[in-house]
Image (tube, rainbow, N blue to C red):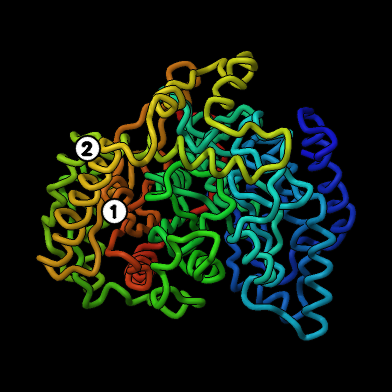
Amino acid sequence: MDAEHPLDPSRRSFIAKTAAAAAGAALAGTGGVAGAKARPGPDGRSRGPHHALEEATIAELGEQMASGQLSARRLTMAYLQRIRQLDEHGPQLNSILTINPRALEIAELRDAERKAGKARGPLHGIPIVLKDNIDTLDRMHSTAGSLALVDSKPQRDATVARRLRRAGAIILGKTNLSEWANFRSTQSSSGWSGVAGQTRNPYVLDRNPCGSSSGSGTSVSANLAAASLGTETDGSIVCPASATGIVGIKPTVGLTSRAGVVPISHSQDTVGPMCRTVADAAVVLGAMTGVDPRDPATRDSRGHHHRDYSQFLDPDGLHGARIGVARNLTGFSPETDEIFEAAVTAIRDAGATVVDPANLDSAAELDASGAEFEVLLYEFKTDIRRYLATRSAGSPRTLKDLIEFNEAHAGRELRWFGQEIFELAQAKGPLTDPAYRQALRTGRRLARAEGLDKVLGEHNLNAIVAPTGSPAWPTDLVNGDHFLGGSSSVAAVAGYPLISVPAGFAFGLPVGITFMGAAFAEPTLIRVASGFEAATGVRRAPNYQPTLPY
């Protein structure tokens, strides 16, 4: 959307169409991306325009630009055309909320820098999309999917956005998401927002992409950008990564800055990469880390963060590793369990010592305690007020303001589901309340000392594995998500890292496996996850099937 027409959906479409039309004209007769290998679908046919882009890695694209076979401008135009023909038309994935109208201009600047010998690193000239709860101070909006934020602007870039720009990345656009990161209603449909509607799963279009980083998962899976950023409080990176067949890294809380990111919880929120390969995710992660005065939590990352996580990639990374199996985090569905069993066998065959079981016994007590939800309710009320204070005039300033906005615009915002989570949070007191402090202590004890730290230490493990979640369910705006289960909560409450990697398919729907570890164990998790990826090679591009046959 353009700032001059904030509520007109046709304006968003017009911007995307105009940019894509320019891309198509400029690419006419060029044959697409030079040097890239065409990757046809299983039926031998292309899955979309510029199919040579399909599954191209950041390293491959960088090599082509370095050799002069490809320019950042041509690459950006090719992605814009795919967005037009796959996201707005064709399958109508609806994963891109808005296009950066300066994308081609920025690409030209990156090309000029490269020509002058000033390439900034592996992300130079690489188009990346950001979840639309990550602030950008440009002509794009930053809305968290809510109409309430369309008429206001952030005062500056989120730190992660600024760092990606400095690394030479091109912010191509913003992705759709579960509105307010799925923290508005208990009956919500993941991937739906008041601003942009429902995102689709690229493998089977009437299936859900999970959330809340729904558009970030779908767009990268469909090869609409080289990489994306998502955010996670509990499952919001790894669940859509699993459902859309990509890699998602949920970093340790404090490894990446949350400054300029629409919050839920300062004790659990984190920002991470969503990519098609572990290598790509490692490159993007390295560009985002570092201590940020705007986010006090990043002080804990001092001495623990790296600028280059690709150094930890290892196709033989499972050899000699000790991997625990969290059997008590399985059983979501028979299909999921079958894929997970095959994944555990692959881990063992790749040379790892498998400790089975290595259960996180505190998970059930953590769930029953309700501590996590209590903490989130308290922190959201406080954290959203602090965030809204950074927006321009015209923005709501409190959670109460947001509730009243939704009531005043119920026809668009509350048509499918309500805002009962907002109302529960509004009823909470300050962070000095004994109930909040007790819930925070309980959650951390069960997730850390009696959870991940205990099991990792007792068995001398490098990582613990569990299925990320079940195959995607049919999207249902009337009844909401049909979520069967996930394995992210213990690490979410602990603030510890996760990596989800494609592990298999059930009826054409992807299912991921999650590697979880100790605080700031990203190097170890990247090593074992890249080893699993190399040993299994599960990832394949989507084919945009309308529905499953019955």
- Measured from the top left, where is residue 238 in percent x and y? 41, 49
Using the rendered view, name the quadrant where residue 537 is placed.
Answer: bottom left
User: Is disc 2 placed on a helix, strand or loop?
Assistant: helix
- Measured from the top left, where is residue 4 in percent x and y? 85, 36
On the question of residue 276 being in view, the answer is: no
Judge from the rendering whether residue 482 lies leftward or rightward of residue 92; answer left or right: left
Up the image or down, 444 lies above or below 285; here it is above
Classify 10 Å Cα crowding around label 1: few (below 14), some (14-19), many (20 and above).
Answer: many
Instruction: State the residue lying farthest toward the front.
Output: 432
Q: Residue at x 49, y 18 (%)?
A: 417
In the rendered view of the protein, which quadrant contains the C terminus?
top left
Q: Which residue is mark 2?
A: 367
* Mark earlier in primary sequence (1, 2): 2
Classify 10 Å Cα crowding around label 2: few (below 14), some (14-19), many (20 and above).
Answer: some
Up the image or down, 449 lies above or below 438; here it is below
Depth check: 394 or 36 in front? 394
- Measured from the top left, where is residue 412 in percent x and y? 63, 18
Q: Residue at x 59, y 38 (%)?
A: 144
Q: Which mark is residue 494?
A: 1
Q: Residue at x 37, y 73 (%)?
A: 523
Amino acid type indicated by mark 1: Ala
> How far apart are the alpha carbons under marks 1 and 2?
13 Å
